[in-house]
Image (spheres, rainbow, N blue to C red):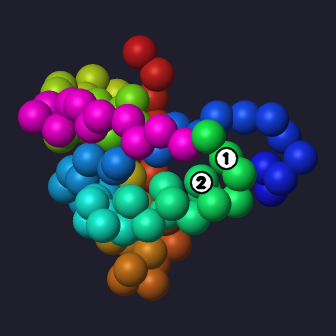
């Protein structure tokens, strides 16, 4: 996808947080991916992970912060309804 695009690739390890369904890859997996990109000719940097103490992942703050929009609550409810095989109907409101 990036073959003809002059670019620098920044790898930022994922910070896991509750209900995300994702896990942080091992350091070995990150290095293997970095090496594969490097061998393909890309300038690659593995960035320092920050924000794990406040459940920050890819710029998103979740978990320990107050969610005034109740967005995460609605997301969890929709996923549960889908898992139960029920049509999802979620009320939204803007304040």
Q: Residue at x 34, y 50 (%)?
A: 14
Quadrant (top left/top right/bottom left/bottom right) for the C terminus: top left
Closer to the camera, 23 or 3? Answer: 3
Q: Quadrant of residue 91?
A: top left
Determine which of the numbered discs, if any, sits on residue 42 in the image.
Answer: 1
Q: Quadrant of residue 29?
A: bottom left
In the structure shown, which secondary structural element does the residue marked by tag 1 occupy?
Answer: loop
Q: Position of residue 51 (x, y in %)?
A: 21, 31
Q: Between marks 1 and 2, how big is the CA–CA gap?
A: 5 Å
Determine which of the numbered discs, if any, sits on residue 78 in the image.
Answer: none
Q: Is residue 8 magenta?
A: no
Q: Height in image: 85 above or below 52?
A: below
Circles 1 and 2, Cβ within 8 Å, touching? The answer is yes
Q: Position of residue 31 (x, y in %)?
A: 39, 60
Q: Residue at x 79, y 50 (%)?
A: 2
The residue indicated by pointer 2 is: 38
Closer to the camera, 63 or 58? Answer: 58
In the structure shown, which secondary structural element does the residue marked by tag 2 occupy?
Answer: helix
Q: Is residue 6 left or right of residue 67?
A: right
Q: Quadrant of residue 69?
A: top left
What segment carries the magenta color? 44-54
- Which residue is farthest bottom? 85
- Which residue is farthest top? 95
Q: Is residue 23 visible?
A: no
Instruction: Classify 10 Å Cα crowding around label 1: few (below 14), some (14-19), many (20 and above).
Output: some
Q: Position of residue 59 (x, y in %)?
A: 39, 30
Quadrant (top left/top right/bottom left/bottom right) for the N terminus: bottom right
Q: Position of residue 76 (x, y in %)?
A: 31, 57
Q: Residue at x 70, y 59 (%)?
A: 40
Closer to the camera, 75 or 28? Answer: 28
Q: Height in image: 86 above or below 94?
A: below
């Amino acid at each position: 996808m990036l073959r003809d695009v002059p670019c620098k690739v920044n790898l930022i390890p994922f910070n896991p947080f509750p209900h995300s369904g994702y896990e942080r890859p091992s350091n070995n997996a990150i290095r293997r991916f970095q090496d594969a990109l490097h061998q393909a000719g890309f300038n690659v940097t593995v960035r320092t992970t920050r924000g794990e103490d406040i459940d920050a992942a890819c710029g998103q703050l979740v978990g320990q912060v107050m969610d005034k929009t109740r967005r995460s609550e609605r997301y969890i409810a929709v996923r549960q309804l889908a898992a139960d095989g029920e049509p999802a109907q979620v009320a939204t409101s803007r304040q």
